[in-house]
Amino acid sequence: MIKDMKRIYYIISAIIALSVYSCDNFDDLNTNPDASTIVSSDMIATQTLKNNFRFWNPNPTDFATGNLWNKHIAVLETNANPYQYYYSYWPYGDFGSYSNVTGLQKMVEFSKGTQVEMSYQGLALFLKAWYGFNATLDMGDVPYSEVGKMDEGIRYPKYDKQEDVITYILDDLKKAEENFAKGKDFKGDIMMDGKVVKWRKLSNAMQLKVIQTFGKKATAAQKARFAEIVAAGNLLQSNDDNFSLKYSENQNSWHPFSSNGEDRRKLTALSKLTVDVLKNLNDRRLFYFAEPADALIKAGKVESNFDAYEGAPTELAAELLAINNQDGKYSLINKRYVAIHSGDPMLYFSYAEQCFILAEAAEEGWITGSAKTYYENGVKASLNYYKGLASAPSSYLHGMAITDEYINNYFTGNAAYAATKADRIRQIMTQRWLVDFFQGNGGKYYYQFLRTGYPEFPFDANTCMNPDGKTFPKRWMYPTSEQTTNPDNYKKAIADQYGGYDGINQVPWWLK
């Protein structure tokens, strides 16, 4: 039985590994005649979702590094991590996710004639849109319309203009929602338990995120579409609809930071930005995120008081951060992240984020409704999320657990909805940024920061490692493999967008 399962796993892996640039068709694969070739749609769905949404390298060091770009945390070692200083060990995007498109096509093919065919079609469209959204944010113009068309003889897909990519993505998300509406609950879904009702809501909510992210370039038709989706009301309704990957106590699916993570935890502090924001709001999420600073406890502070917590300036030179850490000056990441193997689920899209998207849209006049209500609903959703989180037991919360009474009285002082639009947008985006805390998502909120400027990320030209200039990078470079595997389309893309120079400070269309 185990041997047969391994054979099936290898077959699934082979399907999913087929690249859009591959010169081989699926039917041309050499298969072992003695091995089982029975692969079902749900098996492909499971493997694809696992490949897409598990953390890219599940160990504490890389997980901490993956959180640096958003400025939620700081690493405290003498060897400066470029992620903390606006650069990267590998400053390139990639098209690796597109390699899943061939497998997704087989997933749909294997479901033909079944009650769940439309559901798998919806999943394939949603995931392709997800890949395209992330790829175009990372790099600019990217292949999309010709991805996965090897059977039509397209080995080298063209780079679509970013404005066209957005249109294609929105169309695919709309089609995904329509297909899920016609489908039935399906197997193999490790994210939403195969509930087509939830996938419909997510497909609609993702359209809102896409349109708002590219809001500077959004057309009147796209803004109208945004309003129509909101008016229809088929969106995420609560934290139960969150799009997330859950970890478990099974060693094969532990949270990445919990596996031998104590040494790394001692070198990982909350950023000064994070701590100051939470203290300013009297926000008890601080006690879920952090440990009190040792030096402050020794000086007589109490762990249940906000003044026992101090964040590390992410822009400070690495050597100084390491020295200060030895003196116990900073609040390290909460011990629960190591102690509890199931850890916090990795949130990819949440009800709270949706509320903040709607709050901003209401402020901008895209939709009717109360921006204040959307804002407060988003904050309450995030607070309730932590309140009920299994990986946040009271023994790790320093006597400051979030309660219903606390939530009901949250919106006072600096947490009350502001008087001016500029301050309200700042509030909305800062709360949206907090939702993303320690999610290991490679810094995807960073693009919202580039779009809005909130919260104000710290910057010091003396420590910035951006080699092309003392500024915030705007994109990643295209994968180096494109220069040999798809050179004509690659050269045209950088010529059309960036004057022939593929640099991280070049400004893509959506930010102009």
Image: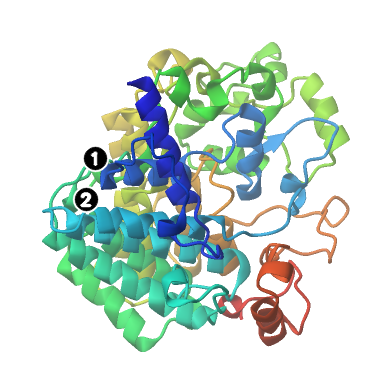
Image check: 506 left or right of 510?
right
Residue 485: percent from left, percent from top: 67, 68
User: Relative to 92, does residue 440 appear above or below in the rendering?
Assistant: above
Classify mark 1: helix, strand or loop: loop
Residue that mark 1 sits on: 193
Classify mark 2: helix, strand or loop: helix
Image check: 28 left or right of 224?
right
Q: What's under tag 1, amino acid-wise?
A: Asp
Asked whether the beta carbons under mark 2 and mark 1 sit within 8 Å of each other, the answer is yes
Image check: 324 left or right of 206?
right
User: Relative to 381, does residue 321 appear above or below in the rendering?
Assistant: above
- Farthest residue in the front direction? 33
Which part of the image, by quadrant, shows the N terminus? top left
Residue sitting at x 19%, y 64%: 179
> Is residue 382 among the parts visible in the rendering?
no
Residue sitting at x 39%, y 18%: 393
Which part of the image, by quadrant, shows the C terminus? bottom right
> Is residue 37 among the parts visible in the rendering?
yes
User: Relative to 498, does residue 327 appear above or below in the rendering?
Assistant: above
Q: Quadrant of residue 92?
A: bottom right
Q: Quadrant of residue 167?
A: bottom left
Callout in the foreground (2, 1): 1
Q: Nearer the viewer, residue 166 or 399?
A: 166
Disc sitting over residue 198 in the figure: 2
Q: What's under tag 2, amino acid-wise?
A: Lys
Residue 242: percent from left, percent from top: 31, 45
Disc sitting over residue 15 in the figure: none
Q: Nearer the viewer, residue 293 or 226?
A: 226
